[in-house]
Image (spheres, rainbow, N blue to C red):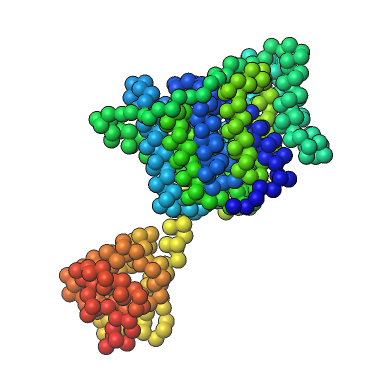
């Protein structure tokens, strides 16, 4: 085990403390929103924060209750009629599934998510942070969603609090304009937090604050459930696990892009699973890697997993009796810190290239951005990946080409005879589900030419064939037999072996060759 460099301790302490202070109101709010209570949110932030920091695979990631996980937990609680123990059984199953996914080494699949999807997700998260924090910045209550924040802008402005706005504006000024020589000693978010809170307390400002925080350790117990509800618990647990895994691994990618490091995705899933299992045992809200808290940690100086441990221990300290010290922190100050985070996380790299970047990629990025802000994070990523796959399929399918040979080396897209009644169909490029329809259309024209009694499919330049292409080729050969046309296939030895191994009814050894000379003989 590598020794911990002591010179990183200051940054990790500041990063963890700042992330913990930012996480505190979020954990309490998610707990209330889930229906389990503020204490459940705090328990979840501590348990998951510590376990994921120690056992996870992303050094600077801060984990805790998140929006998507809170929604699923609230749905489970409502499904079981408010039975808290049954909902915790869902959390336990979700944690176990995450560990299994990590042991099966499925975590690396997130690296195949295209950059436009990641860009739209990052910029969407930034926009969500900004939209949700505009209201508390001026002393109004925090809206429940970005869409609600936009629709209730008039009521928000009507609740304008000058003192809260002064604190929020001062916070923004400090986090944006604090000189580097000062922020190296004390991170600007922490400086703004301390200074603005002192001003608020000493001046007696009447502004919304964090308020009462529950204290005391949670009780340890095993979730219980009935076998009659087992299938429903499994379904909700798997949903929870998939949401948490995607959320965490996307946050890991964000952390990688900021710190120029690489996370260990499978270890991260195991750490998240262990954390959510502990949440189930102590009555905590489930969670995942939290993007905004992770970015706060990095911006405040966090560089190792020690910052995540500090974040968890800080919340635990508050739980054990120091809550009154944080109870007076104005929400407008936290809003100012978070708005700076939201502005920083916007993906300016791609936003600057919107006019020159390929149009399909920008459309994917825009779609993911809109869905992230207005609908759901996980749905946005899912739709983005599907669109990116469709774009890739279309581009690869364009590489496939069907032409006809006249036997002299000349290729055309017109039907030419090689000999009396013999025609060669040249197939080039990838032959898969995206290009087989093109091949079917071209072969139909061959069927209609009078006098054709032999057709040779020259597949020697086919890069690969998938199952759809093999079955399509088998069906075409069957149709040619019905029309009394003799088909032959010329392929590379590897493709020939693949076709024979499938043991389809019509792709037999006697019609598949590895040389054109043998096929035409």
Instruction: From the viewer's perspective, tell me whether residue 26 is left or right of residue 445.
Output: right
Viewer-proximal residue among 7 and 65:
7
Instruction: From the viewer's perspective, tell me whether residue 67 is left or right of residue 9.
Output: left
Asked where in the image residue 224 lies, by quadrant, the reply is top left
Asked where in the image residue 425 lies, by quadrant, the reply is bottom left
Camera sees residue 394? yes
Q: What percent of the width, then of the height, locates residue 10?
A: 72, 39
Q: Is residue 21 above or below residue 407?
A: above
Q: In this view, does 411 lie above or below 344?
A: below
Q: Is residue 43 above or below residue 13?
A: above
Viewer-proximal residue among 214 and 136:
214
Which residue is found at the position 26% from the left and 68% from the top?
Answer: 502
**What is the count of numbered marks?**
0
Instruction: From the viewer's perspective, tell me whether residue 367 is left or right of residue 513.
Output: right
- Quadrant of the rendering where the C terminus is positioned: bottom left
Which residue is found at the position 17% from the left and 74% from the top?
Answer: 484
Instruction: From the viewer's perspective, tell me whether residue 377 is left or right of residue 516.
Output: right
Asked where in the image residue 240 lies, by quadrant, the reply is top left
Q: What percent of the width, then of the height, locates residue 295?
A: 63, 39
Which residue is found at the position 62% from the left and 35% from the top?
Answer: 310
Q: What percent of the width, then of the height, locates residue 230?
A: 28, 34
């Amino acid at each position: 085990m590598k020794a911990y460099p002591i010179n990183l301790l200051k940054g990790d302490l500041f990063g963890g403390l700042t992330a913990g202070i930012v996480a505190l109101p979020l954990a309490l709010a998610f707990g209330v929103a889930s229906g389990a209570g503020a204490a459940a949110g705090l328990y979840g932030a501590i348990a998951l924060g510590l376990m994921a920091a120690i056992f996870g695979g992303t050094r600077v990631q801060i984990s805790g209750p998140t929006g998507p996980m809170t929604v699923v937990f609230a749905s489970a609680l409502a499904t079981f009629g408010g039975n808290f123990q049954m909902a915790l059984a869902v959390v336990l199953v979700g944690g176990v599934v995450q560990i299994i996914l990590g042991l099966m080494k499925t975590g690396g699949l997130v690296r195949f998510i295209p950059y436009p999807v990641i860009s739209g997700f990052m910029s969407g998260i930034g926009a969500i942070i900004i939209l949700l924090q505009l209201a508390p910045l001026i002393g109004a209550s925090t809206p429940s969603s970005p869409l609600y924040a936009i629709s209730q802008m008039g009521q928000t402005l009507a609740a304008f609090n000058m003192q809260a706005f002064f604190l929020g504006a001062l916070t923004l000024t400090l986090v944006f304009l604090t000189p580097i020589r000062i922020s190296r000693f004390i991170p600007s978010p922490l400086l703004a937090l301390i200074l603005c809170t002192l001003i608020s307390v000493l001046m007696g400002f009447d502004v919304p604050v964090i308020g009462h925080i529950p204290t005391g350790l949670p009780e340890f117990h095993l979730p219980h459930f009935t076998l009659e509800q087992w299938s429903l618990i499994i379904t909700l647990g798997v949903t929870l696990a998939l949401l948490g895994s995607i959320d965490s691994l996307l946050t890991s990618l964000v952390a990688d892009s900021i710190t120029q490091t690489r996370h260990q995705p499978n270890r991260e899933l195991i750490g998240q699973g262990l954390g959510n299992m502990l949440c189930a045992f102590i009555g905590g809200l489930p969670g995942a890697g939290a993007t905004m808290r992770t970015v706060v940690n990095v911006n405040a100086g966090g560089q190792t997993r020690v910052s995540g441990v500090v974040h968890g221990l800080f919340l635990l300290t508050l739980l054990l009796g120091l809550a009154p010290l944080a109870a007076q922190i104005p929400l407008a100050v936290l809003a100012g810190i978070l708005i700076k985070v939201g502005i920083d996380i916007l993906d300016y790299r791609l936003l600057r290239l919107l006019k020159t970047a390929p149009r399909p990629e920008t459309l994917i990025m825009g779609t993911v951005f809109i869905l992230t802000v207005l609908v759901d994070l996980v749905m946005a990523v899912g739709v983005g990946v599907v669109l990116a796959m469709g774009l890739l399929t279309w581009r690869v399918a364009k590489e496939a080409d069907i032409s006809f040979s006249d036997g002299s080396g000349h290729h055309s897209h017109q039907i030419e005879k090689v000999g009396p009644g013999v025609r060669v169909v040249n197939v080039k490029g990838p032959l898969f589900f995206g290009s087989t329809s093109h091949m079917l259309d071209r072969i139909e024209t061959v069927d209609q030419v009078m006098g054709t009694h032999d057709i040779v499919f020259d597949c020697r330049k086919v890069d690969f064939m998938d199952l759809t292409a093999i079955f399509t080729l088998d069906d075409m050969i069957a149709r040619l037999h019905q029309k009394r046309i003799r088909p032959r296939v010329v392929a590379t030895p590897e493709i020939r072996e693949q076709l024979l191994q499938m043991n389809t009814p019509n792709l037999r050894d006697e019609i598949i060759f590895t040389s054109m000379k043998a096929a035409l003989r």
